[in-house]
Amino acid sequence: MHLVSKTTRIVALITSLIIVVAVATADAQEISLTKIHDDGTYNAFTDLAKFQGQYYCVFRSAISHGGASHGVMGAIVVIRSTDTKTWEEVARFTEVDVDLRDPKLLVTPKDIRVYAVDCRQRPKGAIQYANCAWSSTDGATWSDATLMAPGYIFWRPKMNDGKFYVPAYVRRPGYCGVDILVSDDGYDWHMLSTPIPPAKVQGETLWANETEILFLENGKALLFARRNYTGTPNPELAKFGGFRAGIVLQSDAATLTQWDVLDESLYFHCPAAVEHDGRIFLTGRDRLKKADGRYTETGRLWEFVVGKGFTELVHFKTHGDSSYMGIVAEGDEVLVSYYSTHEGVTAYFEKPGKADVYLSRVKVSTE
């Protein structure tokens, strides 16, 4: 794998402030919403980080939501800003006949890294999954890709006490669980534990996939995991589109081997979490019931309190094909990146469409 461009390319991404239409609580208020990338194509699956005083947003760019099995090959784009209003493209990663998906950012003491899922089609049609990473010490010049962890699909790698950890899931018949992988360098990984093993509920396979790990200041670690039903639809489950509420687990951060269930009350996809001033914030995709009784999807920000559950803080201006957030907290604000098609055209599978990337600033109470 190789880097297509290592030079900084300035992109015309200066956009006007969008009128905010968001539902908020007294404890949180969306104070600005800015479109930070719109090039007329399908830009989705974002993440957000701050490195050396600058903000970085990463996302997948393609013609549609579809992947390698539909002939859609996504590139990974990294944009950077000093003020979150004016953005420049600093990297674009591609690979011939490979769909790159679900990029995530990780800031280490030495560099900033982009991790992405490497999806390529085998000769008989099956998709082969692996992961890859690029790194930069200055955010402008990036390494070639390092391929790793074949068979796994990474979510968001994190660091704790000098080691790297990532919740990872697999897509193969009979196994739909989530493993915790550990690494000394963030490239060579081995399995540490299986907090969410394969299971059947009400006669259907319970598929756990997108799982966020959050290391807390009190020495604990939390997992926020998306879950779906799969297989032959159970009529009682089919009316919810096959989706099930997510699950929150807790373990000692030093071991990550014994996991206890804390909560199973909230429906969420694509979790991104941060602890800030002793508070735990989670953002992700939720269901939204339409006037005709059917469901679409939308993005929200919640606060999670151990033993008390979730409180919704903000309902973002999203619907349909949307969300996949990144989150950064600083001062009295939480910054959330996401994508949405509410100004474009939904583009599943091979159907071309348009999706844009947005950045929301949410002021949260610090009392």
Image (spheres, rainbow, N blue to C red):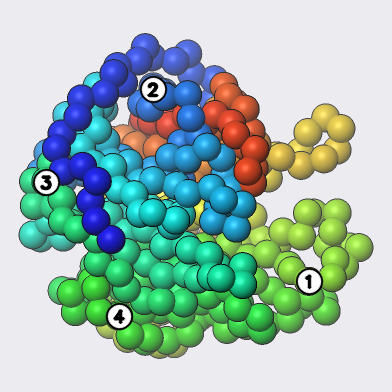
In this rendering, position of residue 320 left or right of residue 86: right
Label 2 SS:
strand
What amino acid type should be assigned to the residue bearing mark 3? Thr
Residue at the location (58% across, 24% down)?
Answer: 344
Query: Of the residues under marks 2 and 3, which one precedes in the sequence?
Result: 2
In which quarter of the view is residue 331 placed? Answer: top left
Q: CA distance from mark 3 to mark 4?
A: 25 Å
Task: Identify the mark at residue 34; answer none if there is no mark.
Answer: 2
Q: Is residue 351 above or below residue 105?
A: above
Where residue 248 sits in the image (x, y, percent)? 53, 67
Within-10-Å neighbours for mark 2: few <14, some 14–19, many 20+: many
Give how far apart the Cα atoms at labels 2 and 1 are. 40 Å
Tags 2 and 3 touching, CB below 8 Å: no
Residue assigned mark 1: 231
Q: Secondary structure at mark 3?
A: loop
Q: Amino acid at mark 4?
A: Trp
Give the CA separation, mark 2 to mark 4: 37 Å
Across and down, in percent, residue 138 comes to 8, 46
Q: Nearer the viewer, residue 251 or 339?
A: 339
Residue type at mark 1: give it: Gly
Looking at the image, tell me whether mark 2 or mark 1 is earlier in sequence order. 2
Residue 272 visible from this viewpoint: yes
